[in-house]
Amino acid sequence: DAGSKSGRGALVILEGLDRSGKSSQCARLLSYLEGQGCRAEGWRFPDRGTSVGQMISAYLANESQLDDRTIHLLFSANRWEKRALMESKLLGGTTLIVDRYSYSGVAFSAAKGLDIQWCKAPDVGLIAPDLVIYLDVQPEKAAERGGYGGERYEKIEFQKRVADHYHSLRDSTWKVVDGSLPMETVEEQLRELATNCIQKCQEKPLTNLTW
Ligand code: TMP
Ligand code: MG
């Protein structure tokens, strides 16, 4: 009985390149969990609904120009402004399925050439995920899926560098899922990973991200 009253909720992150299928899979996973009677919410970063999020959104749409370090810190600030709510949801027993987190922050900024340690530093102290699911799709395959929305980073050469940096960030909380498999197969794997995670972390305390 994933997500029964007693324990805390799990922090489950989906990561991957643009067009790797994260958003669709987040939605599918969320409705599955809800159907199982698990208390869960879908979140995403950037959260474009805040004033910081609106600055990020304008930058991504090429409607504004910002220095690379400045936009990096705004992405981080956008997570910090949600940290308190995230903590209270998790402690209250709600599982969060989150589309992108600090790994996107580091992988995308490092792909511009920024120092990795510098990129990691501002996110130290955010809540550490219980599970990071990386949807692994070749940049060429992702591009074939089309629908690159014309946002700033949606270019194949850039996405290749992002993929390399994601690779170097993998740690013990990561599970890599082949995102080129049929949608239903990917969905099935995510259900199993998330359900296990939710059960296992009920009694575990929350910890902070240290990298
Ligand atoms: P989205 O398409 O998932 O809304 O994300 C928007 C873009 O922002 C995507 O190309 C990834 C990028 N990004 C960063 O560069 N840094 C971050 O911290 C996050 C969360 C996303
Ligand atoms: Mg996008």
Image (cartoon, rainbow, N blue to C red):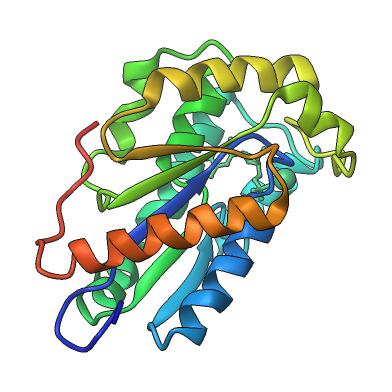
Residue 209 placement, left or right of 102:
left
Quadrant into which the C terminus falls: top left
Q: Position of residue 64 (x, y in %)?
A: 75, 39
Say which residue appears at 38% left-offset and 82% top-offset: 38
Q: Is residue 121 visible?
A: yes
Residue 188 lies in quadrant: bottom right
How many marks overall?
0
Percent of width and height locating residue 100: 52, 48
Q: With respect to residue 18, does 138 lie above or below?
A: above
Q: Is residue 10 left or right of residue 182?
A: left
Left or right side of 203 for 189:
right
Quadrant in the rendering for residue 1? bottom left
Residue at 33% across / 78% down in the picture?
94
Q: Quadrant of residue 4?
A: bottom left
Above or below — where is 110 with respect to 84? above
Q: Is residue 140 left or right of residue 86?
A: right
- Residue under the point 64% across and 40% down: 179
Viewer-nearest residue: 60 or 199: 199
Location of ligand 2 given as a quarter of the image: top right
Q: Residue at x 19, y 35 (%)?
A: 210
Towards the viewer: 174 or 158: 174
Return the x and y of residue 14 as percentages of the image width and height. Answer: 50, 49
Percent coordinates x, y for residue 131 in the rendering: 33, 49
Q: Is residue 81 visible?
A: no
